Amino acid sequence: MKIIVGIGGMTNGGKTTLTNSLQKALPNCCIIHQDDFFKPQNQIAIGEDGFKQWDVLESLDMEAMVSTVQAWIRDPQKFARAHGVSVQPDTTDTHVLLLEGFLLYSYKPLVDLYSRRYFLTVPYEECKRRRSNRSYMVPDPPGLFDGHVWPMYQKYKQEMEEDGVEVVHLDGMKSRDELFHQVLEDIRNTLLNSS
Ligand SMILES: Nc1ncnc2c1ncn2[C@@H]1O[C@H](COP(=O)(O)OP(=O)(O)O)[C@@H](O)[C@H]1O
Ligand SMILES: NC(=O)c1ccc[n+]([C@@H]2O[C@H](COP(=O)(O)O)[C@@H](O)[C@H]2O)c1
Ligand SMILES: [Mg+2]
């Protein structure tokens, strides 16, 4: 059996950290990072606010992301091999795909593919603090967090709620270890229930 799990939520909620830990503990587990699908900088629109609009769906090549997901769905074993994930002979029936990113549940062609949609959040102050310590490939200009990142997060979250997308909320203030064990157990139960 194969399941697709979303590790979504706000920037700096701890998505990438959690996803990388889960991969090591789950059988035949591949990851697709949404961040790998950002368009090149010269294709990112500049808003009326003067900021490059990184935190909108249009800044991501979502068609390419869906194609990558479809390649996994067609042949998870081949996908795993191509991505350097060794397939365990005793569990070849089980395949897990973790999709990880900050706008996983806002793109219609993806939203129904998940067996489970996790949503990691931390309070505003903590998010801003963590973000100020991060260095992205393109550094945040002053004011980006309050002027663009946070308002876009709120906008997409509100749309998701209005659309009735069901998510499992995760408290990103919990320790890395606690989050890892909580989600690992929940995914293992999902696997048992879908077999
Ligand atoms: N559970 C946690 N508790 C405290 N700090 C965390 C936790 N998970 C991740 N971090 C830290 O927060 C920052 C953002 O984590 P990251 O996994 O890159 O988040 P995201 O992918 O959601 O932006 C990193 O510095 C990371 O070490
Ligand atoms: N990877 C990139 O090319 C790039 C460039 C500029 C900003 N970002 C930021 O990455 C964030 C998403 O990644 P995280 O969820 O890991 O923080 C967005 O909030 C976006 O502002 C990424
Ligand atoms: Mg990340």
Image (cartoon, grey):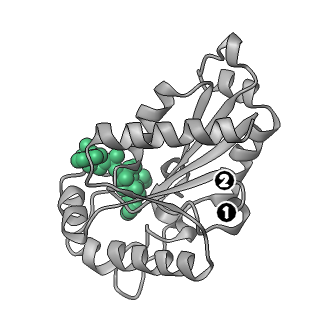
For label 2, the crowd category at 10 Å Cα-Cα, with few meaning under 14, some 14 to 19 and many 20 or more, is some
Picture coordinates of residue 88, whole percent (x, y): 65, 14
User: Residue sitting at 70 percent across and 58 percent down?
Assistant: 63
Which mark, by number, is residue 111? 1
Q: Residue at x 70, y 28 (%)?
A: 94
Residue at x-position 18% and y-position 68%: 125
Residue type at mark 2: give it: Tyr
Q: Is residue 92 above or below residue 145?
A: above
Image quarter in which the C terminus is found: top right
User: In the rendering, at what x and y percent does residue 70 appear?
Assistant: 76, 45
Q: Residue at x 29, y 62 (%)?
A: 122
Residue 44, position as x, y percentages in the image: 48, 68
Instruction: Point out which mark residue 14 bears.
Output: none
How far across and how far down the image is residue 53, in percent?
Answer: 43, 73
Q: Are marks 1 and 2 in contact (CB under 8 Å)?
A: yes
Which amino acid does the dot numbered 1 rest on?
Answer: Val
> What residue is pinned by disc 2?
114
Regarding mark 1 in the picture, which secondary structure is present there?
helix
Classify residue 70 as left or right of residue 57: right
Name the image quarter holding residue 106. bottom right
Farthest residue to the bottom: give it. Answer: 48
**Between 111 and 178, which is closer to the camera in this rendering?**
178
